[in-house]
Amino acid sequence: MKNMSKFEIYANKLVEENHIPGVGIGINKSGERLYEQGYGHRDVENDLKITPDTIFGIASMTKSFTCVAIMQLQEAGKLSVHDQILKYLPEFQTADVKQTEQITIHHLMTHTAGIPPTSTHVFARKRSIDKDPSAKDYLDLDLVNNMGQAIDTYDEMFGFIEELNYQLLAEPGTSFSYSNDSYGLLGIIISRVSGQAYEDYVAEHILKPARLERTFFDLEKLNSFENVTRLYAAKTTEEGVSVYPTEIWWDAPAMRAAGYLKSTINDILRFLEIFRNEGMVDGVRILSQASVAQMLYPHFEYNTGIYYGYGLRITSDYYGDTLIEHGGGLKGVSSLMFILPERGLTGVALSSLASVPSGRLLMGALNVLGGREADATHLHFETEPIDEKEFQRFVGTYKSGEGMNVQIDVKDGQLMHFTGGSHNPLRHVGHDTFVGIEKNQHDTIRFISNEEGKVDRVFYGSRQILRDGK
C-alpha cells in the first residue's frame, strides 16, 4: 500500500528497539483487508513466520467479549445492567455494606464500582505461576515468593475477597479504577444467569455464530491447532535485555472473563464487525443495534477526552473521529484492537511478549494510513508552572495488590518517576497531573488527595494505587 513502506521502517525499528520476538498487525476497511504484516516470528528458534491465523493470547481484550455476553443476556430479559450485583452475587462482601449494596452490573462493566486493584487476579493465576520459571521476570518477586493458597473456584474467589475486607475507593459510579476483579465477577454473573459455564456461554453465543473458529479459552486446545505462537519472556541484566522462550501459558479458571481468550488477527477482525456493523457479522446478528450503542457509549471520562464504555475505551476526538479501542497485557501477551467507525476501519495487533508497544505499532500504521507521521499523537499537554516545594507532596511509593509499584521522588529539582531501573522526569500539566518527558510521555500520572488534602493515591495505568502504608 501507498506509504506503508515508510511505516515498515518505523515498525522494524520499534520491534528491534523493544526486543519484540514477533507481532502481527491486521487492518480492515469496510470488512475487507487493507493491510496485514507479521514482524519477527511466531517461533524465533524455528524460524516460523506470523500469519493472520497465528494464535496469540489477547489478555484484556477478552473484556469486550464478556460485555457482549452481558448485553445478550439483557436482550433476553435475564438481567439488566442496572441491577444490583448482590441480586446475583449475594456472597460478595467489602468493608462497607451500604456502598456494596449500591454496586450495579453497569459499575462493574465501566470499572466504577470502587473496587481497588487487589491481589485476587494474582492468586487466581497461582497454579500457572507455580510451575512457570519465567514468572519471576514478569511479576514482583515479593508476590511470587509470598503467595498463599490458589483461587481455583468462584467460592474461593468470594472467600478471598471477603478476607481482604477492603474499603471501596469511592461511592459506586463516581470514580474510575481499572478492575480485573470486576470482570471476574461479571463472569460469575454470566454463568449464574445463563445456567452455563462462562466459557461455554461465550463459545455458544459469540464465538460459534460469529464463526471465530480459532478463538477459545481452553489451554488444552492449543495442542490441536497448527500455527500457534510461542510465548516469550524478558529479563534485564547488566548486559541488557534478554528475551527467551517460555512454554507456560497462564490461566485463571475463576477469572477467565477478565482476560484469557486466545485468538488470531483474522478472528478479532471478524469480532470487531459487531461494533462496526451494528451488531452483525456476515449477516448473523450477534447484538442488537441498541446494545452496540450502549456498549460504545462514553459512560465515564477517566482521563481528559478518554472514556470507558462497556469493555471498550472511547476517545471522543481522535483527529476529528471517534476511536474505540482496548488493549491487553499478560505474561507472553501484548495486544490492541480498534474501531474507527466514521472511517469504517478496524485493526488489531497481537504479540508474544508482555509490556511491549504493540499498540504504538498498530496506531503507527493507522497514522500512516491517515497521512500522518507514524509516531504522531493526538495528545498534547501544555506544561503548567508548579512550585518545586509542591513536589514533596507527591514523593513516596505507591503499591497495588496486583504488583504495580510506582515510586516518585525528586532529583536535581525535578519530580521523577522511578521505573524499570531508570528515572523518568515528569512535567506538570495541571491539577496535580504529570506526564513523562523522556519515555511513556503520553501516559498521565495524576495524584489524588483525601478529604484532609493529603495525597493518598496515584492514578496510574488506569488504576488508583494507594500510597504505601495506606
Image (spheres, grey):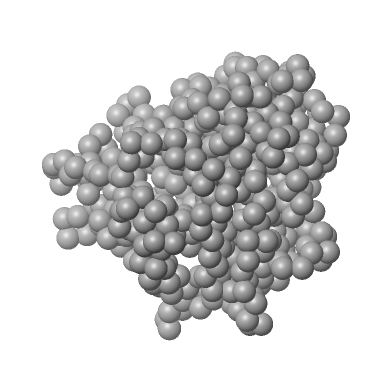
Residue appearing at x 31%, y 53% in the figure: 372
Residue appearing at x 77%, y 39% in the figure: 209
Residue 454, percent across and down?
31, 33
Residue 60, percent across and down?
60, 47
Q: Is residue 245 left or right of residue 413?
A: right
Residue 92, percent across and down?
70, 28
Q: Is residue 39 left or right of residue 202?
A: left
Residue 159 can be seen, yes or no: no
* Total tally of numbered discs in the picture: 0
Q: Is residue 323 left or right of residue 438?
A: right
- The residue closer to the viewer here, 205 or 112, is 205
Q: Quadrant of the C terminus?
A: top left
Above/below status of 450 relative to 32: above
Residue 431 can be seen, yes or no: yes
| Image quadrant where residue 265 sits | bottom right
Above/below status of 3 relative to 81: below
Residue 65, percent across and down?
66, 39
Residue appearing at x 59%, y 74% in the figure: 41
- The residue closer to the viewer here, 98 or 336, is 336
Residue appearing at x 47%, y 27% in the figure: 298
Q: Is residue 305 left or right of residue 260?
A: left
Q: Quadrant of the N terminus?
A: bottom left
